[in-house]
Image (spheres, coloured by chain):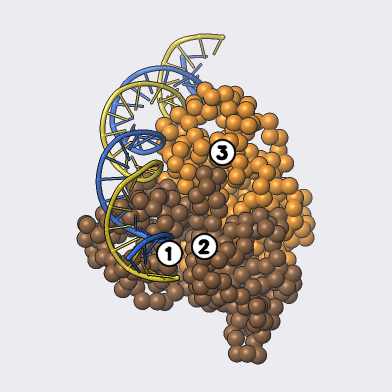
Chain colours: A orange, B brown, C blue, D yellow
Amino acid sequence: MAKAATSNGNPGPAVRAIDQWLSSSGRMHQLLTDQERAHLAVIASIVRFKKGEVIYREGQSVDAIFNIINGIVTSYRKARSGDEHIAAFLFPGDLFGLSEEGRYTNSTRAITPVTAYRLPIPAIRSRLAKDATLEFHVICKLCHELRQAQRHAFLLTERRAVVKLAMFLQMLEQLQAARGEQTAEIHLSMNRSEIGEYAGMTLAAVSRAFHSLIARGVVKVRDRRNVSIVDRNAFDKIAGDAIGASAPPRPSA
Amino acid sequence: MAKAATSNGNPGPAVRAIDQWLSSSGRMHQLLTDQERAHLAVIASIVRFKKGEVIYREGQSVDAIFNIINGIVTSYRKARSGDEHIAAFLFPGDLFGLSEEGRYTNSTRAITPVTAYRLPIPAIRSRLAKDATLEFHVICKLCHELRQAQRHAFLLTERRAVVKLAMFLQMLEQLQAARGEQTAEIHLSMNRSEIGEYAGMTLAAVSRAFHSLIARGVVKVRDRRNVSIVDRNAFDKIAGDAIGASAPPRPSA
DNA sequence: CGGCCGGTTGAGTACAATCAATTCTGGTGG
DNA sequence: CCACCAGAATTGATTGTACTCAACCGGCCG
C-alpha cells in the first residue's frame, strides 16, 4: 500500500461523470482539477486487489472510500436465498465505499485485477471541509451514480430476458462511449453469471438470450467477452430506444 | 408562488436523511442548520401542486430543483410499452430535480396535494459555492438517495409478487419509523397501481399479493390505504429479514 | 341514480426458473 | 505441441409464477 504523493509523478485520484448541467453528448469528463487531484494524492494510498478478491463486506465498519485507477469492481449484496445481487459495476474513475450509520452498505469485489486509491474517511472529510469545489464535484459524481442506479432499476422492471440483455449491452456500450473508447465492439468485463446477477436473471436465461440475439442476426460474438452489434436497428428496437441512443437520459430522485 | 423569506417565520427548506457516519438506529435527522435553512429560504419560493399534477417532464430543460414541505411526489419514466415505471416516491424533506446535461432525467407528479420549495438552479449553485457545510449536507442526502435506489433495485430482482409486496411494505414502514411517525399501522400514500409501477408488477398481481398476505394472516387492511402487520414473524420471513429490521442498511456504489 | 375509477377475481398463456446433462474453452503440465 | 482438467457456458425438459385479457364489484361524485 504505497503512498500516492504527487512527487512521484502520480496525477492523483480521477473522478469522471456525465455533467448534469452542460450538454456533452453523453461524454464523461474528469471532474477534478489538477490541484484537487494533487491534494487528494497526498491523503491517498494505492492499493491492489487480485481478481476475485473481496475488498470489503457489507456491515463492516467504514474506514475508507476508494477510487478506481484501473480494473473492474462489483458492488453486491447477498439475498437470503444465497445468491448475490450485483448493485453496480464500477469502472476506473468511479468512487465506492457507500455507507450508512458507519457501516458499508454493500460488499465489493474485484472482478479483474484492480488498482485503486484508498482514501481514509477522516482525511477525506477534512479535505472536503476545506474545499468547496471538490465537494461540488463529489455532488456531481453522486448525481451521476444516482442516475445510473435508477437506470439499473428501470432495466430490472423488464421481464423478458432478451430485452434485459439488450438494455444491458446498450448500457455497456454507452459507458464505453462515454469513456471515449472505441465502440465497434462491446467488451464484457464480467461473465454470464455476473450479467445475470446484475440484470436479475439466471445464468441459463442470459445464455438463452444471447443465443436468441445471435440467431436473429442482431449481434455477433467474437468470443465470450466481445460482442458487436450487427443490426443496429433491430437492436435499438429490442432495447426500447426510449432509454437508449438519442434521448437525454435520466434525472430525478 | 410566494417568496419564502424568513421574515414571515418560515424556517426554510428541510433536508432529512439517515446519517452515513453515525449510528442513529435508522432515524433520519435534519441535515441543515437553522442558518442554512434561512439562507435557502431567501432564494426559495413556495409552490403548490394539486393531486395528480405533473411538476415537470423528463427531457425538459432544468431551471430549478425542489424540496418537499408536505405531500408525496413520484419520480417516473415511461417505458416504450406505454406504462410508467416509478423510480422513487418522494416525501417531505426530500429533494428532487435530478438532471443530466441540463435536462430533467425523470418526470415528476404530485400524488397528493403538495407544497414545496422551488430553488432556482443559478441561485442554488451560487449558494453551494459559498457554503461548504451545505454542500456536505447535500452529499449526505445524495448518499441516502443512492442507498434508497439500490434498495429499490434489490426489491426489483425478486420474482415472487408476495415477497416484493412484503419488501415494499417493510420499506414504507422503515421510512415511517425513520421519520419518527407511529408504526402501528403502515399508511399507503399511493394506490395499488402505483405500488405495481414501483415494484415492477401489474395491478392485478399487487391485488393478489395483498389477498395472499391477508389470507395467511400476515397483515390486516383497515382500509385500502392503511395496513397493519399481524404476524411480524411471518412477515419478516417473507420479506427476507436480510434487508429488513435489524441489520444496518445498504451502502455501495 | 348512473357512471367512473380503482380495485378484485377468474381462465388461459407466456416466459423464465429450476434441475440436470452436456459441451466448450482456456489454462496446465507433460 | 498436445492431452487433459476445471470452470464457464450451452442446451433440454419440466414447472412455477405472473402476465394478459376480461368480466365484475363497490364506493364516490355529480
Same chain under badges 1 and 2? The reply is: yes
The residue positioned 43% from the left and 61% from the top of the image is B249
Measured from the top left, where is residue B96 in percent x and y?
Answer: 59, 65
Measured from the top left, where is residue A29 in percent x and y?
Answer: 73, 51
Report the disc number at residue A222. none
Front residue of D28/A134: it is D28
Q: Which residue is mark 1?
A: B190
The residue positioned 27% from the left and 63% from the top of the image is B219
Q: Residues within 10 Å of mark 2 (few under 14, many from 20)?
A: many
Residue A111 in view (yes/no): yes
Looking at the rendered image, the quarter that the C terminus of chain B falls into is: bottom right
Q: Which residue is mark 2?
A: B74
Same chain under badges 3 and 2? The reply is: no
Decide if residue B136 is on the left or right side of residue B112: right
Element under disc 1: loop
Sequence order check, earlier mark of 1 and 2? 2
The residue positioned 58% from the left and 27% from the top of the image is A218
Q: Are marks 1 and 2 in contact (CB under 8 Å)?
A: yes
- Residue type, label 3: Ala
- Residue type, label 2: Thr
Same chain under badges 3 and 1? The reply is: no
Residue under mark 1: which chain is it in? Answer: B
Distance of label 3 from label 1 (alpha carbons): 29 Å
